[in-house]
Amino acid sequence: MTAKKSTTRRDFLKLSLTGAGGLAVLGLASQIDRANAEAADNSKHSWAMVIDQAKCNGCGNCILACRASNDVNPDITWNKLYHQDSIAGKEVYLSVPCQHCEHAPCVSVCPVKASYYREDGIVMMDYDRCIGCRYCQVACPYGARSFNWETFDGPNPAVPEWGEPDVERRSRGVAEKCTFCVQRIDRGLSMGLTPGVDEAATPACVNACPQDARLFGDLNDPESPVSKALAASPHYRLKDELGTGTRVYYLPADRAQES
Amino acid sequence: MLATLKPRLNSPYSLWLTGLLALMATGAVAGLVVFARGLVVTNLSDYVPWGLWITIDITSIALSAGAFALCAGAYLMGLKQLRPLARTAAFVGLTGYTMAMLCLLLDIGRPDRFWHGFVFWNVHSVLWEVTMCVGLYFSVLMMENASTVAELPWLKQRFPALAAKMHHLHHYTPALAVAGLGFSLLHQSSLGATYGVLASRPIWFRPGLAVLFIVSAVIGGVAMTLLVSMLTKRLRPETAVDDSLISNVSRALGWMLIGYLYLRFWDLFAMTYTYTPGRSEGLHLLTKGPLAFNFWVGEMLVGVVLPIAILLVARWRSNPNLRMAALASVVVGLIAYRWDTNLLGQLIITSPFTGAEELRLATYFPSLVEWLTAGGVIAFGLLILTLGIRYLRVVDHDHESCRV
């Protein structure tokens, strides 16, 4: 082995280590950027939604309000509606937005950390980072994620009847899902409003429900609508046995008979 | 040089090349349609987001596993007689990974962001680990093949210094074999784990998938290498190919297939006797549903039982036609296994709530654009292999680097 060769090898190692380090720094820097972008006091809150199946009549207004507010492609639904059961002649519906899991399969599997947790528990998407591999879709137990198979251009049929868009449209080729109307929460908080109480700070689907079947609020605040509803009524979460720890709670339709 | 490149127009070779180029041209046009219009031109859906392209991706990676397995055997385990096969396998591997990456570029929604995985790390994601390992292993394969490419007379004449440097990389083969073994064990298994870690899909959710993927990949990858070597000998009889070496390795493959059958049997049998929502239905899709033909005939009969018989009975194995048929059927069985596995978990539409009374089934059949692009990618792989065999002599058991 000549001296020249070993130098080359050392240079090669140096170069590759520098490269790997550089990549890691880039990755880290982007995490810091994201943390700074969040409101400073997010960690104080723990957002949750409560959906009362005794009140929900399957009208679908929540879907339309969501489409308008989040400028969602009419082929995509962030807030899927299922017919779950018929109890004593009454139809029972199940409205399924993103469940904002505490241990979210989509966040674990995303190869580029495009799906991530906010400090207030909301599972967010970075649409500028998503590569469109669709692993999150395959991993989600709740079918909450939709993929932008084509560009959504042209007018949104839900606008203006059901509201005005207050977020940017997603590009073709990325996954998207319900965000608990994070833009309304953050803007509302900065205006000193209380999400779940003041409409301007509350998710569009909650405001649009004619049956008042949807509640929103902070689990850390015992006086929030969700905390009070959960304290007063039996409730369940979807596929709790998977250990996902969802943030959407359901009040069962037949609880009057149970209690 | 140009004289040898000029094919006679009516020869089978030029017809073969013309056919491949035509498939590639159609595939390229179809690929442009995909990039222009987006994935809406596929038959993929929110129920079945992973289809034909992913299957080709994981299949061509599996069929490339001969590279790491044979290089590890030849350069780490002291089985020096495997060296000629390792040289072929490394080239087959480079071709397979190139095909896989082409398919991935088509498949991801934002091909312009393919590099995000290398910059934005999610160490908890098996798919991130697969991305990193595939990327790193591809560079290992390029270095492993550098000395082969360095033999091109044109390169030697035109860029002698570069050719010499590339040739020199041959000295690092053992080190590259270590890296290749590590990266491959990781990502070949993780491709199975990609499905196996998903609690939302009960038919996939089991640790065995990682094991089945690596074992089937090694068997399929070695079979592919042997098949390429035998086909070369058949089509270019002047090629030096050590038939007794191929026969011996084929026999070992027969025994490995028995091991695979054993693992697969217990993997399936363990899911049989109790009802688990989603999982039992998935099993039925395989054993008596729409995938039953693929499973019983493609995976089991063609992919396992027939080749075990042919490769382990000395009289049958010594017949080159039968042996080639057996090796080809191993490859077919592997393709069927990857296709079935990928679809199984997606065809069952999981209900968002527990206790749904009926499970709905999704359907998926690739669209014309998917078939055409897939045909283009496969034709591209076959073209690279053909040119490699002809001009780089990747099948040559008398090659200087292979002498023990």
Image (cartoon, coloured by chain):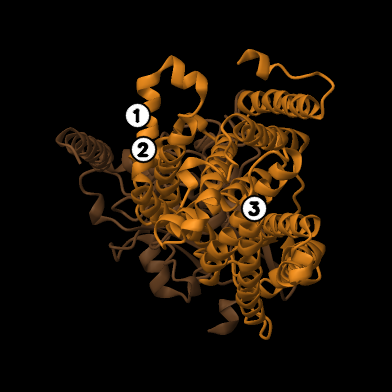
Chain colours: A brown, B orange
Labels 3, 2: one chain = yes
Q: Nearer the viewer, residue A235 or B251?
A: B251
Q: Are marks 1 and 2 in contact (CB under 8 Å)?
A: yes
Question: Alpha carbon of mark 1 to alpha carbon of mark 2: how far?
Answer: 7 Å
Helix, strand or loop at mark 3: helix
Give the residue number, with chain letter if any, for mark 2.
B169
Which residue is denoted by mark 3 in the rendering?
A: B226
Question: Could you say whether the residue bearing mark 1 is in a helix, strand or loop?
Answer: helix
Mark 1 residue type = Lys
Precedes in sequence: disc 3 or disc 1 = 1
Task: Give the residue type at disc 2.
Answer: Leu
So how many labels did they put on this image? 3
Is residue B235 in sight in this rendering?
A: yes
In the rendered structure, the residue with mark 2 lies on which chain? B
Query: Mark 3 is on which residue type?
Result: Leu
**In front of the other: B371 or B171:** B171
Looking at the image, residue A148 sits to the left or right of residue A125; the answer is: right
Q: Which chain hosts label 1? A: B
Q: What label sits on residue B165 in the rendered view?
A: 1
